[in-house]
């Protein structure tokens, strides 16, 4: 295998009589390496592209973001975008086709120039940003003089000129050369002696040293300023001690968070750029004059460094927005505001600003009778007693009281803070889960392209594999996670539980444990604010929009109270929970995507898009329908027979969804609008017929009649009467054959 110092490869002269694989190695590596690397590159490209584009949009559209610091970060986003666009497409092509090189002389130089310029600009921007942060924290007066926008613009322009000037000599050193009948894009001349070594010294080691030293000084400065400042209040001395203790704790936690972020920045910088420069040095000093490896050890080192450096080299374009933008509260607020303006004009409620004051917490004082006051009471406060302090209680002060001041009457209601959380006081609002928003948008857009490939390019065996994997995943969700583990509608043997666990992994919706916990939360709080899939807000919300939001504080607290003891005793479930991501990588990604390439020579596009994205999208919606189907097939509020009574179902076995919420242990309740005749129900009967499933739970018509009669006479809830009637129900051993 030959070395290429810019990551490109060669073009074969068709008249070459010697097999090129004998000189340059195989045209591509094993699919077990190429496919995962391609997927990783695709995710990096999409994430980096959208992350940096959103960064630029947020900074441009919000005037309060027009600061010197954000101008540097805007420059960083532009350099990352240039790096992705100029380098990633050709890099992905070279993974699949190391030779022939098909891009020509001009692209060989232009690609190198763009990649080197963007790389230099990224590193110099990070260094300049670090210097600016150091001056702002450690030398604020000097920073005030340098923080003018005009000065920042000049610095950015100068930075890009320097980056281009440093990249130009390196790029012009590359060109096309024919070696033993093979045309390669590599270094053909020397303009600056040891240019790559100098680049490593001045564009990696020197910035790394500067960043490490300055962030260390920033951390020391923050640590020194950790001593809390006294508050000038007129409260009793013990209150000052309480406040000082709270301030010291909050200040220490804040400092620790900042220091951790600084360490993450330094470590991230090293991890992303060290393999890139190491690969360059190996390529320079490990190559003979004929551009071949000097030894097999160097060849192996170069082989692994090529993939490692490529991944981390482009990962830097994804983590830069995280390190320098998303960790900023100001940026997150501007990002939310921008998204709301562009896409969410129909938001649930407008964001309003209000100013409030919180009273200084008081310690317990004895009453005139000598006893301690406790509980809730009202206390009149003058405006002079109020301090604008953000305080909502502390573990160190379990009996602290928090005052909420009425804006008009100046009357404060003081309540005792308890260790047990009052659910009624938890927020029921749900924030947008932006990573999920971006992820699902990508999945559906890529699936649209996959549909086109399905009809134009994909082979028949690939389509059959799509159908089979979708069926397996659906069975894992319905007969496995839903009916077996969530509702215990039947008992499965160990062999069947293992198979269903593997099938459920193909769903890609988290482990069985996590899925069941969310589903049981849905059942336990059906048609209430605690239901994350509340169908009262419509099918679109229950099916899709709810997946784009985080659980509210109220729902999170309810979720933690769900009884999961039965699953915690299930060794198969807990094994999957522990090793979920390993199983997911092998079963969901590696094996399915590799099969079309290895066994029937289908295209990489069909494999990734049809078997990857389209399959995931289909399974995604199939699993979502388990919770949202009630909005499609269930009775609606206000109809003749209310859903809670479910009389219609009891009469003609229709409108099963609400019956499912009355008696979820019935194995015949299908997920997709049927009772007793669905595909999943048929498979459960097959499990039972083969001895893999036993104790199938269902309701006989006679049992339903008894329950209905009891409910009518006693006026008790139908679910209670059904459970009572079940105690006297005796099912035939082969009842599932009916």
Image: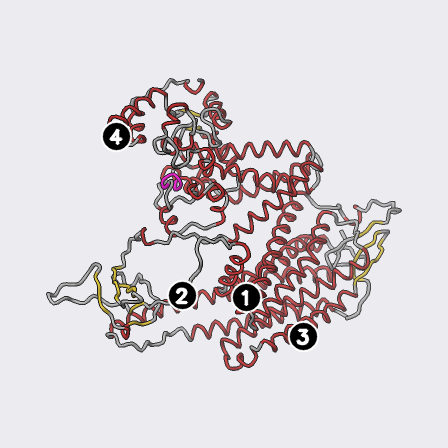
Residue 601 at x, y percent in the picture:
71, 36
Name the N-terminal-most of marks 2 and 4: 2
Q: Residue at x 51, y 76 (%)?
A: 136
Q: Which mark is nearer the camera, 2 or 4?
A: 4
* Mark 2 to mark 1 CA distance (whole Å): 30 Å
Name the N-terminal-most of marks 1 and 4: 1
- Viewer-proximal residue, 143 or 19? 143
Residue 158: mark: 3
* Mark 4 to mark 3 CA distance (whole Å): 82 Å
* Mark 3 to mark 1 CA distance (whole Å): 25 Å
Name the N-terminal-most of marks 3 and 1: 1
Q: Which mark is nearer the camera, 2 or 1?
A: 1
Residue 253: mark: 2
Q: Secondary structure at mark 4?
A: loop
Region in magenta = 520-525
Helix, strand or loop: magenta stretch: helix
Relative vertical location of residue 44 with respect to residue 270 in this rendering, above or below:
above
* Mark 1 to mark 4 CA distance (whole Å): 61 Å
Name the N-terminal-most of marks 2 and 1: 1
* Mark 3 to mark 2 CA distance (whole Å): 38 Å
| Labels 3 & 2 near each other (Cβ < 8 A) | no
């Amino acid at each position: 295998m030959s070395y290429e110092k810019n990551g490109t490869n060669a073009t074969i002269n068709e008249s070459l009589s010697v097999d090129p694989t004998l000189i340059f190695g195989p045209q591509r590596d094993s699919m077990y390496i190429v496919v995962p690397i391609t997927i990783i590159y695709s995710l990096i490209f999409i994430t980096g592209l959208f992350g940096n584009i959103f960064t630029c949009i947020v900074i441009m559209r919000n005037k309060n973001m027009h600061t010197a610091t954000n101008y540097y970060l805007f420059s960083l986003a532009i350099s990352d975008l240039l790096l992705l666009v100029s380098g990633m497409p050709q890099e992905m092509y070279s993974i699949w086709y190391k030779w022939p090189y098909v891009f020509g002389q001009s692209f060989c130089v232009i690609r190198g120039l763009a990649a080197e310029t963007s790389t230099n600009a990224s590193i110099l921007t990070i260094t300049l940003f670090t210097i600016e942060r150091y001056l702002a924290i450690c030398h604020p007066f000097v920073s005030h003089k340098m923080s003018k926008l005009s000065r920042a613009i000049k610095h950015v322009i100068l930075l890009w000129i320097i980056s281009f000037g440093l990249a130009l000599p390196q790029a012009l050193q590359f060109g096309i050369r024919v070696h033993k009948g093979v045309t390669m894009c590599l270094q053909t001349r020397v303009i600056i002696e040891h240019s790559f070594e100098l680049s490593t010294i001045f564009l990696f080691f020197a910035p790394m040293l500067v960043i490490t030293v300055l962030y260390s000084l920033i951390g020391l400065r923050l640590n020194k300023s950790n001593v809390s400042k006294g508050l000038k209040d007129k409260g009793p001395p013990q209150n000052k001690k309480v406040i000082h203790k709270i301030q010291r704790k909050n200040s220490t936690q804040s400092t620790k968070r900042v220091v951790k972020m600084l360490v993450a920045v330094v470590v991230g910088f090293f991890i992303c750029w060290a393999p890139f420069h190491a690969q360059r040095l190996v390529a320079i000093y490990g190559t003979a004059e004929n551009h071949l490896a000097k030894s097999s050890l160097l060849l192996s080192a170069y082989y692994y460094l090529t993939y490692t450096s490529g991944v981390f080299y482009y990962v830097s374009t994804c983590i830069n927005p995280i390190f320098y933008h998303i960790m900023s509260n100001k940026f997150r607020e501007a990002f939310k505001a921008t998204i709301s303006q562009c896409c969410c004009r129909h938001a649930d409620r407008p964001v309003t600003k209000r100013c409030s004051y919180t009273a200084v917490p008081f310690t317990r004082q004895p009453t005139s009778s000598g006893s301690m006051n406790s509980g809730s009471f009202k206390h009149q406060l003058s405006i002079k007693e109020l301090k604008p302090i953000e305080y909502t209680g502390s573990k160190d002060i379990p009996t602290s009281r928090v005052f909420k001041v009425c804006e008009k009457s100046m009357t404060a209601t003081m309540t005792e803070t308890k260790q047990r959380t009052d659910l009624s006081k938890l927020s029921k609002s749900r924030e947008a889960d932006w990573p999920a928003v971006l992820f699902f948008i990508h999945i559906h857009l890529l699936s649209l392209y996959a549909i086109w490939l399905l009809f134009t390019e994909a082979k028949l065996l690939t389509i059959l594999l799509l159908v089979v994997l979708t069926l397996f995943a659906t069975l894992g969700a319905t007969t496995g996670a839903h009916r077996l583990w969530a509702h215990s509608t039947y008992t499965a043997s160990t062999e069947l539980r293992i198979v269903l666990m593997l099938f459920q992994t193909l769903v890609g919706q988290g482990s069985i444990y996590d899925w069941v916990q969310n589903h049981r939360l849905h059942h336990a709080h059906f048609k209430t604010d605690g239901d994350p899939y509340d169908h009262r807000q419509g099918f679109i919300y229950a099916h899709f929009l709810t997946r784009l939001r985080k659980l509210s504080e109220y729902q999170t607290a309810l979720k933690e109270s769900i009884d999961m003891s039965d699953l915690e005793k299930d060794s198969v479930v807990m094994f999957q929970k522990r090793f979920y991501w390993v199983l997911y990588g092998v079963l969901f990604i590696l094996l399915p995507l590799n099969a079309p390439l290895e066994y029937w020579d289908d295209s990489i596009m069909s494999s990734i898009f049809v078997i990857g994205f389209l399959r995931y999208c289909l399974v995604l919606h199939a699993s979502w329908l388990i919770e949202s189907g009630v909005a499609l097939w269930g009775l609606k509020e206000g109809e003749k027979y209310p859903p809670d009574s479910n009389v219609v179902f009891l009469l003609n076995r229709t409108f099963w969804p609400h019956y499912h919420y009355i008696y979820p242990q019935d194995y015949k309740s299908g997920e997709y609008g049927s009772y007793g005749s669905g595909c999943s129900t048929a498979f459960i009967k097959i499990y039972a017929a083969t001895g893999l499933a036993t104790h199938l739970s269902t309701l006989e018509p006679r049992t339903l009649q008894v329950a209905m009669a009891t409910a009518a006479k006693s006026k008790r809830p139908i679910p209670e009467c059904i459970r009572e009637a079940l105690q006297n129900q005796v099912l035939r051993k082969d009842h599932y054959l009916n």
